[in-house]
Image: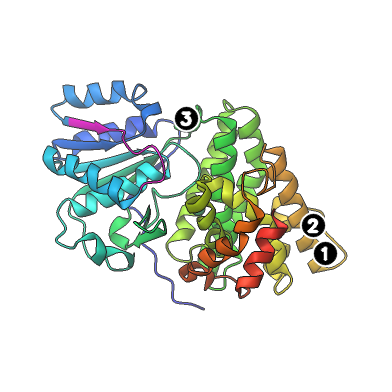
Amino acid sequence: MNLLNISYPEKFVFGKGALEKFKNDFFETSFKRLFILTIPELQQQLEDLVLDLKQNGITVLSDASIIKEPSFADFEEVLIKAKDFNADSVVGIGGGSALDTAKLIAAQLQNTQNLEEIKGNGNLKERQTYLTCMPTTSGTGSEVSPNALFVDENGQKVGVISPFLVPDAAYVDPKLTISLPPSLTAATGIDALTHCLEAYTNKFSHPFVDLYALEGVRLISKYLLRACTDGNDLEARTQVALGSVYGGMCLGPVNTAAVHALSYPLGVQYHLPHGLSNALLLPFVMEFNIEKEYGKYKEVALAIGAEKGKTDKETALNGVKYMKELIQKCGIELSLQKAGVTKDSIPALATGALKVQRLLKNNVREVTQSDAEAIYKAAF
Ligand SMILES: [Fe+2]
């Protein structure tokens, strides 16, 4: 059994009313200058919260300038604002981009290490500023994970991964995901499902993490279509949000594999949203992996409700078929070409994917340049 190393938030609040709980908990702290990193769509919804905070003696600066997957340059701009404001606490309220940025802001407000020194796994050595996160999508699981991802000056996705990026407190209120449109619900939900699936089928999977991973796969595959069809279905939203948290809990100790490695170049080169590029690749990476190892994919197939086959491998492949149908029913057309990818870019995409060895090393089957090209072609 591999060494298990987990850091989760000290405080975790889940369910209807979590937003209110955040506010009341914050009043109990001694912090007086709160930097809120959020998204433009939410600023109006947060007006009451900001007003309440101000009436209770908290000085608040709200920033909503992160509107896409952030680059390190975007991060630096926000950091200057947070430093000028003299923030003593940070909360991220939004999707993965806002949360990842908030996490690194909290770390870098006081840190003496520069960006170059903290990139990679385990290099960030401290965070002194109080940090909370509140997701408004059910996708990244960033609110409970040690990861923050940014685009570097070469257009590569680079991770800063450190236990110091795990927030002090995470508040997950499924009601905050109600206004998310179906396309984003689908893409972010499949991202969360992929976190769980890639942890469960991971070369370095662990029985402790498997519990969350398989349950996350089951919950999201069962409820995602309902959440996409009727955004106001709070039960479906809640179950998908729970699955997303489980996915986030897999990211620190086990992490993802080939689906994520192959999806990053699609984000960089074609600016496809992270969840969408995962959705477009997931069934095809599953097919590729099943040729080598199908035991856990059989379990995945049964967890998502696919039909049992005559053999374990057949069951595993039924799972792929089921997954393709689920993704399509959620409104995502399974075609890289339809998403705007051109066939002649496949070799370069594969070269880009092969650079993401930090994730490819987790994949149950080795991925070569020609394998990666074949997966993109199958997904084309
Ligand atoms: Fe992801």
Position above or below: 51 against 4 = above
Please state the extent of the stretch shown in magenta in the rendering.
60-70
**From this viewpoint, which residue is outermost toward the front?**
344
- In this view of the protein, can residue 27 be seen by the observer? yes
* Residue at which label 2 appears: 318
Q: Nearer the viewer, residue 145 or 360?
A: 360
Q: Secondary structure at mark 3?
A: helix
* Residue at the spot of label 1: 314
Dot 3 corresponds to which residue?
175
Q: CA distance from mark 1 to mark 3?
A: 39 Å
Residue type, numbered disc 1: Glu
Residue 251 as seen in the image, left or right of residue 366: left
**Disc 3 to disc 2, how far (Cα)?**
34 Å
Q: CA distance from mark 1 to mark 2?
A: 6 Å
How far across and down, in percent of the image, does residue 368 sit? Answer: 61, 74
Bin the neighbour count of mark 3 within 10 Å (Cα to Cα): few under 14, some 14-19, many 20 and up. Answer: many
* Residue at (40% x, 30% y) in the render: 17
| Image position, residue 194 (x, y; %) | 58, 54
Secondary element at tag 1: helix
Furthest toward the right, the residue is 310
Q: What numbered label is drawn on residue 2? A: none
Residue 305 visible in image: no
Residue drawn at (62%, 33%) of the image? 228
In what element is the residue under mark 2? Answer: helix
Q: Are marks 1 and 2 in contact (CB under 8 Å)?
A: yes
Classified by dominant secondary structure, the portion drawn in magenta counts as loop
Name the amino acid, label 3.
Lys
